[in-house]
Amino acid sequence: MKRATPAPETKPETEPALRYRVREGHVLQVDDATSARMARVRQKATKPELLVGKALRALGHHYRTHNRDLEGSPDFANRRARWALFVHGCFWHRHGCSATTTPGRNREFWEAKFARNRARDQRAAEALAARGFRVLVLWECETKRAPPEELQQRLRAAFAGS
């Protein structure tokens, strides 16, 4: 006769320890795991930017990267040909694709932040256009789901008039 073995004790799942921080007028709930994850988000030399740079080089375009002296710091720009190209992350710049999610925690803060990002993007594009630049925007998801040849074709079409 077999004896019943007691069920293994399960450790109760603990909620991450939350800290509170004030940022941009909002009281935020912050945990260490989320903070570490957000710190790993790259700002320069992202994979989509590298793919776009490779496509631009393949098409023979010359450019400078991360032009801090131009409005909005375009990811790629050519001052002589008067074009500026932004590679926007779908999450941060609110593309509308499946990557455009809004975090549940601190939702009010995130919605305000995303609205400011969109307004800043619009101001930068208008300021560059006023200076005579052709402004192009490529989205992160477009660089991920399209093969490199399709990305080159899209850039070729965008630059056809320049």
Image: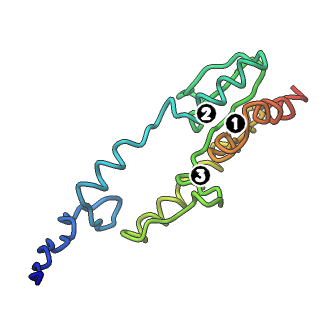
Q: Residue type at mark 2: give it.
A: Pro
Front position in the image: 40 or 19: 40
Q: Secondary structure at mark 2?
A: loop
Q: Residue type at mark 1: give it.
A: Leu
Examine the image and state in which quarter residue 21 appears.
bottom left
The residue wearing badge 1 is 128
Give me the disc on residue 90.
3
Counting other residues with Cα less than 10 Å from the Cα at mark 2, is it few (<14), some (14-19), or many (20 or more)? many
Front position in the image: 44 or 33: 33
How much space separates mark 3 and mark 2, taking CA atoms? 16 Å
Label 1 vs 3, first from the N-terminus: 3
Question: Residue 124 at what x, y percent from top left?
Answer: 63, 43
Q: Secondary structure at mark 3?
A: helix
How much space separates mark 2 and mark 1, taking CA atoms? 10 Å
**Dots 2 and 1: beta carbons under 8 Å?**
yes
The residue wearing badge 2 is 74
Q: Secondary structure at mark 1?
A: helix
Mark closer to the observer (3, 2)? 3
Counting other residues with Cα less than 10 Å from the Cα at mark 1, is it few (<14), some (14-19), or many (20 or more)? some
Question: Residue 26 at what x, y percent from top left?
Answer: 33, 66
How much space separates mark 1 and mark 3, taking CA atoms? 21 Å
